[in-house]
Amino acid sequence: METIIVQPPGSSRPGEVRVTGNELLHMGPGDVADFGRGVPGGREVSIVLSDPGISRRAGRLEAAEDYWRLSNFSRDTAYAVENLEGAGEYITVAPGRLGAPVPFEFSRVVLPALSGTVDFKVFAPQHAYLDERSSPGAGDATVHPYALDATAKYFLVLVALCEPRLRDPSDGTLPSVGDIAERLRPLESCRRLTRSAVNYHIDYLTFAKLRLDVGDEPGADGNARTGAKRARLVSLALRFGLVREEHLALLPSRRRPVLHASGA
Protein backbone atom coordinates (compact mmCIF):
# COMPACT_ATOMS: atom_id res chain seq x y z
CA MET A 1 0.00 0.00 0.00
CA GLU A 2 1.44 3.38 -0.97
CA THR A 3 2.34 5.92 1.69
CA ILE A 4 2.44 8.87 -0.69
CA ILE A 5 1.43 9.79 -4.22
CA VAL A 6 3.51 12.39 -6.05
CA GLN A 7 2.04 14.57 -8.79
CA PRO A 8 4.92 15.93 -10.91
CA PRO A 9 4.68 19.32 -12.63
CA GLY A 10 2.57 19.29 -15.78
CA SER A 11 0.84 15.97 -15.07
CA SER A 12 -2.91 15.76 -14.85
CA ARG A 13 -4.25 16.20 -11.35
CA PRO A 14 -6.16 13.39 -9.62
CA GLY A 15 -9.36 15.29 -10.43
CA GLU A 16 -8.75 14.75 -14.15
CA VAL A 17 -7.24 11.26 -14.32
CA ARG A 18 -7.36 8.24 -12.08
CA VAL A 19 -4.69 8.39 -9.43
CA THR A 20 -3.57 4.97 -10.55
CA GLY A 21 -2.40 6.51 -13.83
CA ASN A 22 1.20 6.22 -15.00
CA GLU A 23 1.79 9.97 -14.65
CA LEU A 24 1.71 9.78 -10.87
CA LEU A 25 4.48 8.36 -8.72
CA HIS A 26 3.34 5.91 -6.04
CA MET A 27 5.71 5.31 -3.13
CA GLY A 28 5.49 2.84 -0.26
CA PRO A 29 7.38 2.68 3.04
CA GLY A 30 11.13 2.82 2.44
CA ASP A 31 10.87 4.06 -1.16
CA VAL A 32 12.94 7.11 -2.12
CA ALA A 33 12.69 9.46 -5.11
CA ASP A 34 15.11 12.21 -6.07
CA PHE A 35 13.87 15.44 -7.65
CA GLY A 36 15.67 18.09 -9.68
CA ARG A 37 16.66 19.04 -13.20
CA GLY A 38 18.42 15.75 -13.89
CA VAL A 39 21.51 15.07 -15.95
CA PRO A 40 21.09 14.10 -19.63
CA GLY A 41 22.83 10.79 -20.10
CA GLY A 42 23.73 10.67 -16.42
CA ARG A 43 21.96 9.96 -13.17
CA GLU A 44 18.21 10.27 -13.61
CA VAL A 45 15.78 11.78 -11.14
CA SER A 46 12.28 10.47 -10.53
CA ILE A 47 10.67 13.93 -10.43
CA VAL A 48 11.95 16.21 -13.19
CA LEU A 49 11.80 19.97 -12.56
CA SER A 50 12.71 21.59 -15.86
CA ASP A 51 14.14 24.97 -14.90
CA PRO A 52 17.80 26.03 -15.25
CA GLY A 53 17.65 27.52 -11.76
CA ILE A 54 16.96 24.10 -10.18
CA SER A 55 19.90 21.88 -9.19
CA ARG A 56 20.41 18.64 -11.07
CA ARG A 57 19.73 16.78 -7.80
CA ALA A 58 17.80 19.26 -5.71
CA GLY A 59 16.49 16.92 -3.04
CA ARG A 60 14.85 13.65 -2.11
CA LEU A 61 11.50 12.33 -0.92
CA GLU A 62 11.36 9.32 1.37
CA ALA A 63 8.14 7.50 2.20
CA ALA A 64 7.80 6.33 5.82
CA GLU A 65 5.03 4.29 7.42
CA ASP A 66 2.26 6.89 7.28
CA TYR A 67 4.08 10.13 6.41
CA TRP A 68 7.04 11.28 4.33
CA ARG A 69 10.36 13.06 4.69
CA LEU A 70 12.01 15.71 2.55
CA SER A 71 15.76 16.22 2.11
CA ASN A 72 17.15 19.49 0.72
CA PHE A 73 20.43 18.97 -1.15
CA SER A 74 20.90 22.68 -1.83
CA ARG A 75 23.71 24.47 0.02
CA ASP A 76 22.11 27.90 0.03
CA THR A 77 18.41 27.68 -0.85
CA ALA A 78 15.50 26.75 1.43
CA TYR A 79 12.44 24.90 0.14
CA ALA A 80 8.86 25.47 1.29
CA VAL A 81 6.23 22.80 1.85
CA GLU A 82 2.70 24.26 1.84
CA ASN A 83 -0.33 22.66 3.43
CA LEU A 84 -2.98 22.72 0.68
CA GLU A 85 -5.71 22.18 3.29
CA GLY A 86 -4.47 24.94 5.60
CA ALA A 87 -4.93 28.69 5.61
CA GLY A 88 -1.43 29.61 4.46
CA GLU A 89 0.26 27.03 6.70
CA TYR A 90 3.70 25.88 5.56
CA ILE A 91 7.05 24.59 6.79
CA THR A 92 10.52 25.58 5.56
CA VAL A 93 13.21 22.97 4.92
CA ALA A 94 16.60 24.62 5.39
CA PRO A 95 19.57 24.14 3.00
CA GLY A 96 21.30 20.85 3.70
CA ARG A 97 18.47 19.54 5.91
CA LEU A 98 18.06 15.79 5.58
CA GLY A 99 14.92 13.79 6.34
CA ALA A 100 12.64 16.62 7.49
CA PRO A 101 9.26 15.02 8.39
CA VAL A 102 6.22 16.50 6.65
CA PRO A 103 2.94 16.22 8.60
CA PHE A 104 0.51 17.42 5.92
CA GLU A 105 -1.84 15.15 3.99
CA PHE A 106 -2.04 17.52 0.98
CA SER A 107 1.28 19.24 0.27
CA ARG A 108 2.88 21.43 -2.35
CA VAL A 109 6.70 21.47 -2.46
CA VAL A 110 7.88 24.85 -3.76
CA LEU A 111 11.39 25.61 -4.99
CA PRO A 112 12.72 29.00 -6.13
CA ALA A 113 13.59 29.02 -9.84
CA LEU A 114 14.53 31.39 -12.65
CA SER A 115 10.93 31.32 -13.83
CA GLY A 116 9.73 32.34 -10.35
CA THR A 117 8.97 29.09 -8.56
CA VAL A 118 8.60 25.44 -9.49
CA ASP A 119 6.41 23.08 -7.50
CA PHE A 120 5.03 19.58 -7.32
CA LYS A 121 2.34 18.06 -5.10
CA VAL A 122 2.55 15.21 -2.63
CA PHE A 123 -0.48 13.38 -1.21
CA ALA A 124 -0.26 11.19 1.90
CA PRO A 125 -3.53 9.22 1.90
CA GLN A 126 -2.46 6.75 4.60
CA HIS A 127 -2.11 9.21 7.48
CA ALA A 128 -2.97 7.52 10.78
CA TYR A 129 -5.53 8.91 13.22
CA LEU A 130 -6.21 7.96 16.83
CA ASP A 131 -8.85 5.32 17.39
CA GLU A 132 -10.46 6.08 20.75
CA ARG A 133 -11.23 2.40 21.17
CA SER A 134 -7.56 1.35 21.02
CA SER A 135 -5.64 0.60 24.20
CA PRO A 136 -2.00 1.69 24.61
CA GLY A 137 0.46 -1.13 25.12
CA ALA A 138 -1.94 -3.79 23.88
CA GLY A 139 0.24 -5.00 21.01
CA ASP A 140 0.51 -3.81 17.44
CA ALA A 141 -1.77 -0.92 16.55
CA THR A 142 -4.65 -1.61 14.20
CA VAL A 143 -4.35 0.20 10.88
CA HIS A 144 -7.75 1.53 9.84
CA PRO A 145 -8.44 0.54 6.22
CA TYR A 146 -10.22 3.86 5.63
CA ALA A 147 -8.26 6.56 7.49
CA LEU A 148 -10.29 9.73 6.98
CA ASP A 149 -9.57 13.13 8.51
CA ALA A 150 -12.86 14.69 9.64
CA THR A 151 -11.21 18.15 9.54
CA ALA A 152 -10.23 17.88 5.86
CA LYS A 153 -12.15 19.44 3.01
CA TYR A 154 -12.54 16.10 1.23
CA PHE A 155 -14.49 14.86 4.28
CA LEU A 156 -16.90 17.79 4.00
CA VAL A 157 -17.47 16.81 0.37
CA LEU A 158 -18.21 13.25 1.44
CA VAL A 159 -20.65 14.39 4.16
CA ALA A 160 -22.48 16.66 1.70
CA LEU A 161 -22.65 13.75 -0.75
CA CYS A 162 -24.17 11.47 1.89
CA GLU A 163 -26.51 14.10 3.41
CA PRO A 164 -29.76 13.16 1.60
CA ARG A 165 -29.45 9.49 2.59
CA LEU A 166 -28.48 10.37 6.17
CA ARG A 167 -31.54 12.59 6.58
CA ASP A 168 -33.89 10.13 4.88
CA PRO A 169 -32.63 6.58 4.15
CA SER A 170 -35.34 6.17 1.52
CA ASP A 171 -34.11 9.24 -0.39
CA GLY A 172 -32.19 8.08 -3.43
CA THR A 173 -31.09 11.59 -4.39
CA LEU A 174 -27.44 11.85 -5.38
CA PRO A 175 -26.17 15.45 -5.11
CA SER A 176 -24.41 16.71 -8.21
CA VAL A 177 -20.96 18.24 -8.14
CA GLY A 178 -22.57 21.67 -8.42
CA ASP A 179 -24.99 20.88 -5.59
CA ILE A 180 -22.10 19.94 -3.30
CA ALA A 181 -20.13 23.10 -4.11
CA GLU A 182 -23.18 25.28 -3.44
CA ARG A 183 -24.00 23.41 -0.21
CA LEU A 184 -20.50 23.95 1.23
CA ARG A 185 -19.77 27.53 0.09
CA PRO A 186 -21.36 29.16 3.19
CA LEU A 187 -18.47 27.65 5.20
CA GLU A 188 -15.50 29.99 5.56
CA SER A 189 -13.07 27.29 4.39
CA CYS A 190 -15.14 26.59 1.27
CA ARG A 191 -16.03 30.08 0.02
CA ARG A 192 -13.92 29.58 -3.12
CA LEU A 193 -14.89 25.95 -3.66
CA THR A 194 -15.45 25.23 -7.36
CA ARG A 195 -16.99 22.36 -9.27
CA SER A 196 -13.55 21.25 -10.45
CA ALA A 197 -12.30 21.29 -6.84
CA VAL A 198 -15.23 19.09 -5.77
CA ASN A 199 -14.42 16.69 -8.61
CA TYR A 200 -10.83 16.66 -7.40
CA HIS A 201 -11.88 15.68 -3.86
CA ILE A 202 -14.25 13.02 -5.19
CA ASP A 203 -11.42 11.45 -7.19
CA TYR A 204 -9.08 11.65 -4.19
CA LEU A 205 -11.64 9.89 -2.01
CA THR A 206 -12.41 7.31 -4.69
CA PHE A 207 -8.91 6.27 -5.68
CA ALA A 208 -6.56 7.28 -2.85
CA LYS A 209 -8.52 7.18 0.41
CA LEU A 210 -11.16 4.50 -0.15
CA ARG A 211 -9.48 2.71 -3.08
CA LEU A 212 -12.68 1.93 -4.98
CA ASP A 213 -12.74 0.05 -8.24
CA VAL A 214 -15.14 1.89 -10.52
CA GLY A 215 -14.22 0.35 -13.84
CA ASP A 216 -15.15 2.40 -16.88
CA GLU A 217 -18.39 1.25 -18.48
CA PRO A 218 -18.26 0.93 -22.27
CA GLY A 219 -19.70 4.05 -23.85
CA ALA A 220 -20.06 5.87 -20.53
CA ASP A 221 -19.46 9.60 -20.74
CA GLY A 222 -17.78 11.77 -18.09
CA ASN A 223 -21.03 12.48 -16.26
CA ALA A 224 -21.88 8.79 -16.03
CA ARG A 225 -18.43 7.94 -14.66
CA THR A 226 -18.65 10.75 -12.10
CA GLY A 227 -22.12 9.56 -11.10
CA ALA A 228 -20.83 6.01 -10.60
CA LYS A 229 -18.05 7.28 -8.34
CA ARG A 230 -20.47 9.35 -6.25
CA ALA A 231 -22.87 6.43 -5.88
CA ARG A 232 -20.08 4.05 -4.80
CA LEU A 233 -18.73 6.58 -2.31
CA VAL A 234 -22.14 7.05 -0.66
CA SER A 235 -22.75 3.30 -0.54
CA LEU A 236 -19.42 2.47 1.10
CA ALA A 237 -19.38 5.46 3.48
CA LEU A 238 -22.83 4.64 4.87
CA ARG A 239 -22.35 0.89 4.88
CA PHE A 240 -19.26 1.06 7.08
CA GLY A 241 -20.26 4.10 9.13
CA LEU A 242 -17.53 6.35 7.78
CA VAL A 243 -20.08 9.16 7.66
CA ARG A 244 -22.73 9.24 10.38
CA GLU A 245 -25.63 11.45 11.39
CA GLU A 246 -23.51 13.43 13.85
CA HIS A 247 -21.25 14.51 10.97
CA LEU A 248 -24.12 16.56 9.54
CA ALA A 249 -23.22 19.19 12.15
CA LEU A 250 -20.12 19.94 10.02
CA LEU A 251 -22.34 21.28 7.22
CA PRO A 252 -23.80 24.80 7.06
CA SER A 253 -27.18 25.05 8.78
CA ARG A 254 -30.25 24.90 6.61
CA ARG A 255 -32.32 27.94 7.58
CA ARG A 256 -36.00 27.55 7.07
CA PRO A 257 -37.81 30.62 5.69
CA VAL A 258 -39.81 32.59 8.26
CA LEU A 259 -43.50 32.53 7.48
CA HIS A 260 -45.32 35.81 8.17
CA ALA A 261 -49.00 35.58 8.98
CA SER A 262 -51.06 37.63 6.56
CA GLY A 263 -53.73 39.96 7.89
CA ALA A 264 -57.35 38.89 7.65
Image (spheres, rainbow, N blue to C red):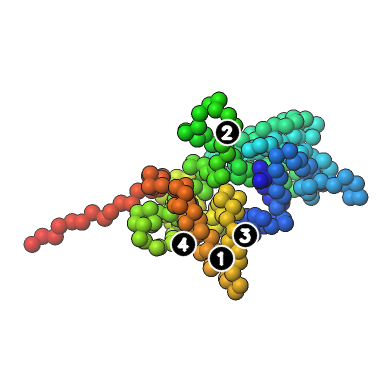
Q: Position of residue 173 (x, y in %)?
A: 40, 63
Residue type indicated by callout 3? Glu
In the displayed structure image, the side of residue 200 where residue 114 appears, left or right: right
Q: Considering the numbered disc 4 on the image, is that residue within a helix, a strand or a loop?
A: loop
Badge nearest the viewer, 2 or 1: 2
Q: Mark on residue 141?
A: 2
Mark 3, Cα crowd under 10 Å, few <14 / some 14-19 / many 20+, is few
Mark before the other along the chain sequence, 2 or 3: 3
In the displayed structure image, the side of residue 217 where residue 246 appears, left or right: left
Q: Mark on residue 16?
A: 3
Badge 3 vs badge 4, beta-carbon distance below 8 Å: no
200 versus 226 height, above or below: above
Residue positioned 45% across, 45% down in the render:
188
Residue type indicated by callout 2? Ala
Mark before the other along the chain sequence, 4 or 1: 4
Residue positioned 63% across, 38% down in the render:
66
The alpha-carbon separation of the residues under discs 4 and 1 comes to: 12 Å
Q: Mark on residue 225?
A: 1
Mark before the other along the chain sequence, 2 or 4: 2
The alpha-carbon separation of the residues under discs 2 and 4 comes to: 38 Å
Mark 4, Cα crowd under 10 Å, few <14 / some 14-19 / many 20+, is some
Q: Is residue 144 visible?
A: yes
Q: Which residue is mark 4?
A: 176
Badge nearest the viewer, 3 or 1: 1
Badge 4 vs badge 1, beta-carbon distance below 8 Å: no
Q: Considering the numbered disc 2 on the image, is that residue within a helix, a strand or a loop?
A: loop
Q: Position of residue 9 (x, y in %)?
A: 71, 51
